[in-house]
């Protein structure tokens, strides 16, 4: 997919607005950036695809990692993050994350976030590959919803932040490698609009919807990466996708995350014959890095001819389970499962994109005026595999740094150029819903947790077959999402084919070992 824009337009004929910040996305990264900018009296507009709460943040269960415990330190958090990242983290970026993280989390608490406490102290849990209990959680397993509540409340109250729901960012307005604004579609009126900004911030989240089985909400279609790519930005580490091991797998039920914190509190994984298998695969057993757990599960599923394994909490104190995991208990109970007694059927599902739009430590992309933070961004903090519960922290820390950077720059001296595109043909008859399913099926089959050159080439042939669509105008938000998914799926498959080794979230059956020559990043540019 190489077209520059998704629709025909002429900015001179469209309604226009001027802002200091145009922020795309309303999860923790977007809303915290908006909050930090508003504290400096900047005028901020947040464009969000559906409602403010339709974000990955709102769904996050496990929590937010920060070295706040007595026996913990940023140095230990750094060590664990680097180890999980399998040699590809940028140590400087991780140092920023773990050292600035605790202060940002305290700020969230001052803003009103109510994290769980024990005897007046913050209650900290453990998740896979953490050497200490350092995960803050809220309402047991509803951490993201609590953070979203606080940040959405701030955004609604702040007089200089405007949140526009139902606004789909179509494309970035970039000329001579400078981003001036965003072309957006108001989904309620069907009207195209132009938002000019001194800083345009991508905080659009991930791409889980590229896969049929995903923990991500329907909005996670990789739009930010696709539009940055179309505009000429560099993207990095696209081959590294994290699959979460434990997602509810029941016929007819939508994928529902069973937090890693459940294993952190002692739950076991068992195969269909009731055998606990993780100790055979890794010394950390159920708390091994996620990619290790996922491959072990897939192996057990294969050898026992089953499409799932089971999470067993029956040996844990039932009162603790109910109190720590109320959302999980309630949801499983709605499917007739008593989590304190019944094994929970689970299978892996796409969860988090380690790669994304390449940025420096201040969220600056390779395009001037365009910034990125949160899951859409890649500053190298997660390397080849993200440490559990580092993602909410990432959104806070790097969102905050964007505002510091923009504030330190002199204002842009010139106005903005006008933009237009009149080249796109009327769309051919394409069934967008069906194409979305086909993309998901190709990605699941060939670009999932286990990859081969042969499969990746098949995936690339599929994307090549559809690349002609880039010359056609997308007619609806559904089509725009699908055009974006085609672009991003192709980038993931390309990067995965280029990296002839296995590392972190990228596993190649034909190159099953890490190779020193690959201690480097794959950076792609249109
Ligand atoms: C979980 O609760 O297992 C997800 C946490 C994360 O992905 O960081």
Image (spheres, rainbow, N blue to C red):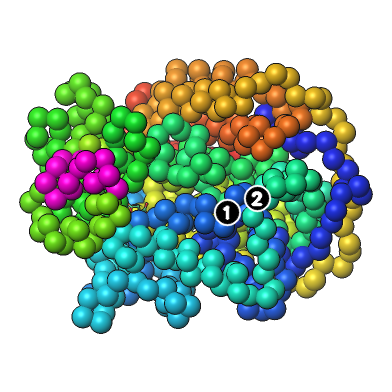
Q: Residues within 10 Å of mark 2 (few under 14, many from 20)?
A: some
- Nearer to us in this view, 107 or 156: 156
Q: Which residue is mark 1?
A: 51
Q: Is residue 272 above or below residue 458?
A: below
Q: Is residue 450 above or below residue 56?
A: above
- Nearer to us in this view, 256 or 384: 256
Quarter of image, res 264: bottom left
Of label 2 and label 1, which has the lower sequence position? 1
What residue is at 36 percent from the left and 69 percent from the top? 66
Question: Which numbered marker is on residue 519?
Answer: none
Q: Magenta stretch containing residue 333, yes or no? A: yes
Q: Is residue 284 above or below residue 32?
A: above
Kindly tell me whether residue 379 is visible in this rendering. Answer: no
From mark 2 to mark 1, how far is it between C-alphas?
Answer: 7 Å
Q: Please state the horizontal and vertical placement of residue 180, each as a whole percent of the image.
A: 79, 56
* Residue at disc 2, secondary structure: loop
What residue is at 51 percent from the left and 26 percent from the top? 437
Kindly tell me whether residue 315 is visible in this rendering. Answer: yes
In the image, the segment drawn in magenta is 331-344
Q: Please state the horizontal and vertical placement of residue 486, each as a whole percent of the image.
A: 60, 30
Q: Magenta stretch containing residue 136, yes or no? A: no
Q: Please state the horizontal and vertical placement of residue 339, each as a whole percent of the image.
A: 18, 48
Are circles 2 and 1 on residues that touch, CB within 8 Å? yes
Mark 1 residue's CB less than 8 Å from ligand 1: no
Q: Main secondary structure of the magenta part?
A: loop
Mark 2 residue's CB less than 8 Å from ligand 1: no
Q: Is residue 22 above or below residue 273?
A: below
Q: Which residue is mark 2?
A: 166
* Residue at disc 1, secondary structure: loop
């Amino acid at each position: 997919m190489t077209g520059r824009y998704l629709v025909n337009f002429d900015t001179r004929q469209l309604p226009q607005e001027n802002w200091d910040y145009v922020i795309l996305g309303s999860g923790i990264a977007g809303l915290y950036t908006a909050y930090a900018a508003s504290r400096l009296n900047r005028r901020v507009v947040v464009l969000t695809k559906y409602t403010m709460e339709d974000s990955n943040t709102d769904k996050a269960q496990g929590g937010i990692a920060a070295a706040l415990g007595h026996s913990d330190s940023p140095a230990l958090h750094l060590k664990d993050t680097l180890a999980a990242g399998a040699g590809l983290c940028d140590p400087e970026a991780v140092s920023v994350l773990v050292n600035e993280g605790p202060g940002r989390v305290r700020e969230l608490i001052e803003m009103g976030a109510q994290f769980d406490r024990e005897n007046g102290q913050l209650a900290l849990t453990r998740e896979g590959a953490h050497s200490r209990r350092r995960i803050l959680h809220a309402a047991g397993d509803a951490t993201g919803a609590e953070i979203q509540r606080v940040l959405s409340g701030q955004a609604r109250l702040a007089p200089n932040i405007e949140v526009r729901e139902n606004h789909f960012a179509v494309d970035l307005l970039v000329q001579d490698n400078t981003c001036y604004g965003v072309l957006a579609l108001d989904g309620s009126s069907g009207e195209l609009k132009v938002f000019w900004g001194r800083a345009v911030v991508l905080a659009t989240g991930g791409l889980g919807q590229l896969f049929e089985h995903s923990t991500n909400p329907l909005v996670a279609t990789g739009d930010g990466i696709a539009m940055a790519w179309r505009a000429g930005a560099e993207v990095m580490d696209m081959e590294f996708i994290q699959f979460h091991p434990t997602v509810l797998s029941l016929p007819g039920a939508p994928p529902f995350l069973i937090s890693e914190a459940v294993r952190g509190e002692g739950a076991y994984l068992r195969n269909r014959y009731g055998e606990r298998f993780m100790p055979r695969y890794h010394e950390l057993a159920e708390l091994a890095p996620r990619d290790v757990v996922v491959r072990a599960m897939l192996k057990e599923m294969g050898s026992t001819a089953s499409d799932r394994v089971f999470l067993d909490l029956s040996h844990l104190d039932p009162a603790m389970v109910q109190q720590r995991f109320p959302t999980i208990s309630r949801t499983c109970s709605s499917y007739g499962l008593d989590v304190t007694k019944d094994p929970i059927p689970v299978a892996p599902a796409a969860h988090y994109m380690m790669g994304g739009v390449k940025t420096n430590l201040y969220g600056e992309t390779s395009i001037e005026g365009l910034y990125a933070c949160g899951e859409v961004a890649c500053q190298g903090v997660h390397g080849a595999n993200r440490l559990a519960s580092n993602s909410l922290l990432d959104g806070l820390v790097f969102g905050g740094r964007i505002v510091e950077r923009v504030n330190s720059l002199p204002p842009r001296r010139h106005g903005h150029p006008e933009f237009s595109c009149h080249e796109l043909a009327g769309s051919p008859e394409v069934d967008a819903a069906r194409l979305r399913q086909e993309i998901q099926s190709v990605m699941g089959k060939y670009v999932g947790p286990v990859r081969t050159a042969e499969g990746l080439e098949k995936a690339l042939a599929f994307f090549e077959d559809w690349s002609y669509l880039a010359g056609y105008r997308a007619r609806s938000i559904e089509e725009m999402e699908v055009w974006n998914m085609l672009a991003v799926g192709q980038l993931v498959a390309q990067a995965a084919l280029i990296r002839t080794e296995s590392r972190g979230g990228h596993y190649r059956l034909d190159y099953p070992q890490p190779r020193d020559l690959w201690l480097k990043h794959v950076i792609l540019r249109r």
